[in-house]
Image (cartoon, helix red, strand yellow):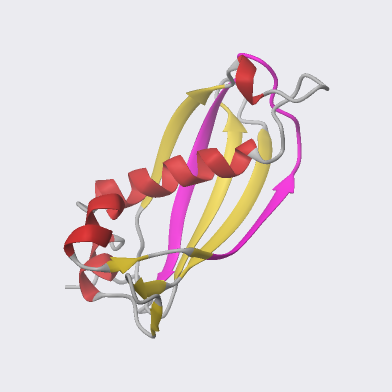
Amino acid sequence: MVTKNENKTPVYRHIETIHKVPFHDLDPMRVMWHGNYYKYFDIARFELFKAGGIDLYEYSFSKGVSFPVSRSSIKHIAPLKFHDEFICKAVATEAEYKIAINFEIRLKDTGQICARGKGEQVAVRVPEMTLLYRIPEDITSSLLV
């Protein structure tokens, strides 16, 4: 059963993960290197699926379907610094023909938004690497509330 809101649109799952900026994530300007934000998006993405009962890594072996990122973007708003504690929020927004997830990174103490991002994934049969035109139903269901 698909949970829907009053507008009859699906209601998707969200999750928040908590992190602390380690030294090895810093760049020469002593702020978190811009590429590392994607690492935390990925951690939150895997936790989002895990909350729905899906281990994406195992899924690719057991079902022969993988979900490569086909599009991503990020808007940097305020830098993260050494030892900053932050929350990375992932919100699924679509899971029918592609998986779409919105991300937000904010400071844990103040709520200051540091970055916002988006990611899209497609379903691909492995090892053939052929595109599936719909997301498998068990994946879609795992992302619904």
Above or below residue 1? Residue 132 is below
Whether 118 is among the magenta residues is: no
Q: Which percent across, then down, holds residue 64?
A: 24, 68
User: Based on the displayed image, in which of its 4 quarters is residue 135 positioned?
Assistant: bottom left
**Going 59% across and 21% down the picture, which residue do you hit?**
21
Name the residue rendered at 81%, 22% in the picture: 28
| Residue 136: % across, % down | 26, 75
- From this viewpoint, is residue 135 visible? yes
Q: Could you tell whether 47 is left or right of 118 in the image?
A: left
Residue 145 in view of the camera: no
Q: Is residue 89 magenta?
A: yes
Is residue 66 shown left or right of residue 87? left
Q: Quadrant of residue 111?
A: top right
Q: Up-down: is 124 above or below 112?
A: below
Which range of residues does the magenta coloring cover?
A: 70-94
Q: Main secondary structure of the magenta part?
A: strand
Quadrant housing residue 139 = bottom left
- In the image, 97 versus 69, the foreground residue is 69
**Residue 49: where, in percent of width, then height?**
31, 52
Residue 144: percent from the left, percent from the top? Answer: 29, 63
- The N terminus: image quadrant: bottom left
